[in-house]
Image (tube, grey):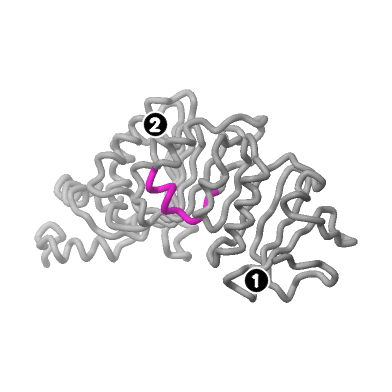
Amino acid sequence: MASLLDMTDVPLKNILENSDYKSVLTLRKVCHSLRNFIDDSCFKTDLDYIRITIGPTGFSVRCESRNASRRRDAVSSKEWTSNDLKTILKMTQNSKLSCFTVKTSPDNVGGLDDLKELLNNLTRPLQTERFDMEGSVTLKVLPYLDSKTLKEIGINPTNNRDAYHNLDEIENVMELEQFKNAVELTIHSCLLVRADLRKFFHFQIVHVRLHETSLEELEALKEAFVTSCDMKYFLVGVNLNENQLQPVFGTPFHEIYHPGSLWFFGNRNCKKHVLKIEGRTGYLLFGKWRAEEVPHGAVVQH
């Protein structure tokens, strides 16, 4: 009976593509020949989610399968070296992840540089539909992700208990194709963004708190919404009360059991939906709303 090592490249590659990634990692440990073949081949895997945590002395990695029945068998490994991480990243080169997450440690800046180099040396950009990372170092990873595959970007603080502080390097992030092509952006509410609100109008879904927001920018957002068929949800942190907003949005509507202010505007390109603006303390929510669900007595402005 022929062994794996007696097979030609094509059937051996087919075996790898029909094996779960845990089995591939096991096969890699059998012998030098299999290890070299796996490392040098480009094949699809069932990897769906990768979370890398950069610790003081190495990498902690959690991988999950695309197959829902195998998610319980997710691999979690601690104290990986950059060579170990290189193996798992190379296995993803011909596959698409649903999510790629990177958590950093201030005690290991070199680990982040190692990750950047590994991503830069891949034969093709890492394909993932969602990317999550701490804001201050996003530029170390985001440029090496496939801009045509990436749809969602999440930028988080290093510590969720931090007070409001500025998001560094956001101007450079906004120049990337990955940022321009994505459709959903979530920036944690404690991160203040210094940018023109109009820079975010190409997204369908946005969570952002700007350092400063002008009435002119809010009016531009309203106009973008009422002429768009794609914009769905836009949460923007502001410190303006309804009296300050009336010159732009008009007189608000108040529901008995609703604590905030409401405004409704007709969508010029879709009669089935309207723009609903909800104002509460500290934020404004712009959302696509079914026209038939507008509260009785509320005026839909045009």
Amino acid type indicated by mark 2: Leu
Rate crowding at label 2 as few (under 14), some (14 to 19) or many (20 or more) other CA atoms within 10 Å: many
The tally of labels here is 2
Quadrant where the C terminus lies? Answer: bottom right
Q: Nearer the viewer, residue 242 or 89?
A: 242
Residue 159, above or below 147: above
Taking the spot 22% from the left edge, 55% from the top edge, the residue there is: 42
Residue 250, above or below 32: below
Q: Is residue 172 left or right of residue 205?
A: left
Separation of marks 2 and 1 at Cα, in angstroms: 45 Å
Residue beneath disc 1: 273
Q: Is residue 224 left or right of residue 81?
A: right
Residue beneath disc 2: 112
Residue 249 is drawn in which quadrant? bottom right
Which portion, as a residue range, is magenta? Answer: 176-185
Q: Is residue 298 left or right of residue 149?
A: right
Amino acid type indicated by mark 1: His
Secondary structure at numbered mark 2 = helix
Furthest residue toward right: 256
**Coordinates of residue 169 in the picture (x, y in percent):** 47, 32
Secondary structure at numbered mark 1 = strand
Q: Nearer the viewer, residue 111 or 276?
A: 276
**Coordinates of residue 270 in the picture (x, y in percent):** 59, 73
